[in-house]
Amino acid sequence: MSFEDFMAKIRYWDNLFARWMMRHFYMLFFEFVLVVIFFWFIFTTFRAIDIASTVSRDNVIEQLMLTQTTSTLIIVLLILLNSFWMLYIFNHINRVRAILKEISFYLTRRK
């Protein structure tokens, strides 16, 4: 085995381990963080719904606070869904990049 073939194998294994770490460590970490935030958001939403049932129709300040809370919850939900979507896109971009690197590795080896 020549030195170039040996270095090509090392680059291949390095790429393989880096891809494994990127896919399983970072993605799972961010997914875990987003799921925790999502469940915290759901519990907060249930609490807001519970509070909404006790707000009287006569009190304008409570009605305004309830409207503000509902608007904020909708915005937070949209931001969370956007975060999940960005993580999904980022994961697929990384997979495509890894596939292209692997194709490039095998094409350079054939030359």
Image (cartoon, rainbow, N blue to C red):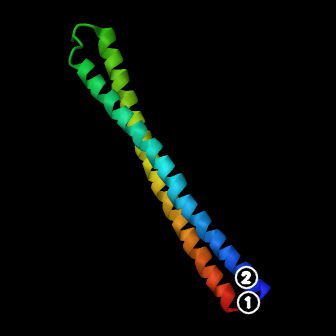
Residue shown at 40% from the left, 45% from the top: 81
Give the residue drawn at x 61%, y 64%.
Answer: 18
Quadrant for the C terminus, please.
bottom right
Q: Is residue 80 left or right of residue 21?
A: left
Q: Is residue 41 above or below residue 54?
A: below
Q: Position of residue 32 (x, y in %)?
A: 44, 45
Nearer to me, 16 or 1: 1
Tell me if 49 is positioned left or right of 10 in this view.
left
Residue displayed at 42% across by 37% down: 37
Res 65 → quadrant: top left
Q: Which residue is mark 2?
A: 6
Tell which of 3 and 62 is nearer to you.
Answer: 3
Residue 23 in the image: state x and y as whole percent: 52, 60
Amino acid at dot 2? Phe
Assess disc 2: are there few (<14), some (14-19) or many (≥20) residues with their C-alpha within 10 Å of its C-alpha.
Answer: few
Secondary structure found at label 1: loop
Callout 2: SS: helix
Residue 106: assigned label: none
Q: Is residue 83 left or right of residue 59?
A: right
Q: Residue at x 79, y 84 (%)?
A: 3
Circles 2 and 1: CB distance less than 8 Å? yes
Where residue 25 appears, as percent x and y from the top left, is 53, 54
Question: Can you give x and y, in whole percent of width and height, for residue 100 in the image?
Answer: 58, 75
Q: Nearer the viewer, residue 41 or 36?
A: 36
What residue is pinned by disc 1? Answer: 1
